[in-house]
Amino acid sequence: MESQRAKIKKTENGNLKIYAQVGRPSQSNGGGEQPVFQTMTAEGRDMSESVAKLFLKSTKIPDLSHLQLLIFSKEVAAGGIQEVLDYLRRDFSIRENIRVAVAGGNIEELLKIEEKLGNQPALAIINQFLINTQRSTVVQAEFKDLVSHLLEPDLQAVLPMIGASEDRFTLGESAVFAGYKMAATLDMPETLG
């Protein structure tokens, strides 16, 4: 499966729920009104079990080397991201330059936003990062940066928070980490100032 995006959140019973948004091959779309992407979910006690269950949801093997974007829910970020990062760091197929963010709101709502050009929501988020890189000082983080900041005792990791308005994604707020846990959020003036 190509062009994967993963979103991770905690459920009410303490399980880890992951969302993977993957592009559908053009031939399977049939030229109809079906979306050009598919959102799959899986839930487990930990990251290993969640990913294993995700593999069972598709006839194709989700290829983690295609992962482009990783979004943590606020709940997972506040509770600590060490377990997820440990799992991903052990998978040698994961690229170090995947973008990492925290969801400013509900992950399910982010995944439902229909971008006007028909992009899948996760691709639209990546495009939003690219646009904002060129015109502002919005915080951006890649997987390798996050890991190195978390392992460096004198640094605090800062991740962008992705939000949603009516028909588009918003950037500007930031999540500040103390160790592996999100400790605070910065609003747009604090982030840009």
Image (cartoon, rainbow, N blue to C red):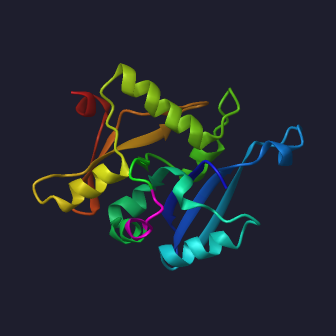
Instruction: From this view, report whether residue 76 is shown above or below residue 31.
Output: below
Nearer the observer, 33 or 191: 33
Q: Give the image quarter of residue 60.
A: bottom right
Which residue appears farthest toward the left when viewing the image? 154
Q: Count of labels shown?
A: 0
The stretch of residues the image draws in magenta is: 88-94
Q: Give the image quarter of residue 112.
A: top right
- In the image, taking residue 171 as reference, residue 111 lies left or right, namely right
Nearer the observer, 90 or 38: 90
Q: Give the image quarter of residue 1.
A: bottom right
On-image quarter of the C terminus? top left
Residue drawn 70% across the image and 73% down it: 56
Which residue appears farthest toward the front when viewing the image? 92
Residue drawn 65% across the image and 32% down it: 115
Residue drawn 64% across the image and 51% down it: 2
Q: Is residue 54 visible?
A: yes
The answer to if 68 sits in the magenta stretch is no
Q: Position of residue 136 (x, y in %)?
A: 33, 23
Q: Position of residue 124 (x, y in %)?
A: 57, 35
- In the image, taking residue 87 as reference, residue 4 lies left or right, namely right
Nearer the observer, 16 or 100: 100
- In the image, taking residue 157 as reference, residue 102 lies left or right, namely right
